[in-house]
Amino acid sequence: MLHVVHHPAYVSPATAGSRFRFDKYGLVMEALKVSGAPFTVHEPVTIPRHWIEAVHDPAYVEEVAALSVPVEKERRIGFPVTDRIMRRSMLSPGGTWTAAKLAMAHGYAANAAGGSHHALYDSGAGYCVFNDLAIAANRLIAEGDARRILILDLDVHQGDGTARLMAGREDVFTLSIHAEKNFPARKARSSLDVELADGAGDQDYMAALMEVLPHTLDAFEPDLVLYQAGVDPHAEDKLGRLALSDAGLAARDRAVMREARRRGIPLASTMGGGYGEDRMAVARRHAACMIRLAAEAMRRD
């Protein structure tokens, strides 16, 4: 059974002047229904504002809450922060935290949003307002739900915001495998970065993943994996520079869950990036990711 966290407010109309669409968060739920896979929907628990402010500048959090984000920050984010955007931005970190709590109970759960890995201390960036991965990881550790957390970022873009927000922490390990020449132009320093050349395909990707993931899990011994499962490494993605096939994405996700399951480590996934004119095709990739992660989590070898 797939446990998925979703809220109707995850879906928001496109904002004026922005190319970013929020409808994929609703289309993913439609794709899950069409798939016929069994799943249970959980509403996200709204995370208290002080947990957001524990990671982000309280002044920036107030700008978002008051709908007074400066124009230069909105440009960096990629869209204006409207009331609908503010609401979903406040909900998404709670969705990732809720998915983590569900994963601890069931082995795996998914937030049908989140993965906002570009958001920085005092500003959003790259279509990200608040960094749900960092917020959830910080709260889970502070409240004693986990001692060590691995944030595994397999989006095609580096998780620069997560790397900066979690820098210097010995209880959070950030591992990012991404396209070397893609956004952001100025990379941060994760605990471990693996940069791939343009056009890297299934074989090169899996070799890179399996070179670092098992060793990281064994050496760091996390109690939980937060998986940024962006599908934008796909060859057809509009903003990607890699060349994974559908089979390559499937192999990636199964390997991630298999390595976590072998060690008895719960895993919570977030959607991350996925872009293209055929938004239903993108939604199906996200849904397929959740379904195969759930299936692999339930396997008995």
Image: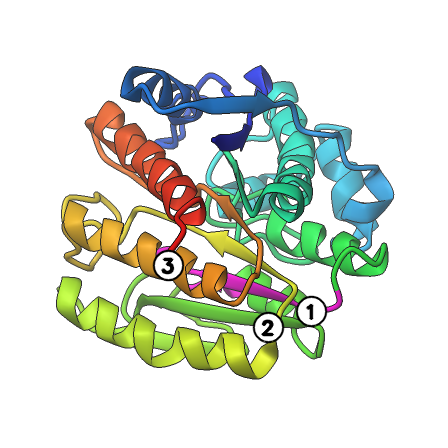
The residue beneath circle 3 is 157
Q: Report x, y in % for residue 248.
A: 19, 55
Residue 173: which numbered mark, if any?
2
Q: Report x, y in % for residue 238.
A: 21, 43
Residue at point 65%, 23% (across, down): 43
Residue at point 38%, 48% (across, down): 296
Q: Secondary structure at mark 2?
A: strand
Q: Horizontally, is 65 left or right of 102 in the view? A: right
Q: Which residues are magenta?
A: 147-160
Residue at point 63%, 35% (across, down): 95
Q: Are the residues at dot 1 and dot 3 in contact (C-beta closer than 8 Å)? A: no
Of callouts 3 and 2, which one flags the residue occurring earlier in the amino acid sequence? 3
Q: Secondary structure at mark 1?
A: loop
Q: Amino acid at mark 3?
A: His
In the rendered image, which quarter is residue 7 located in? top right
Q: Report x, y in % for residue 195.
A: 32, 75
Of callouts 1 and 3, which one flags the residue occurring earlier in the amino acid sequence? 1
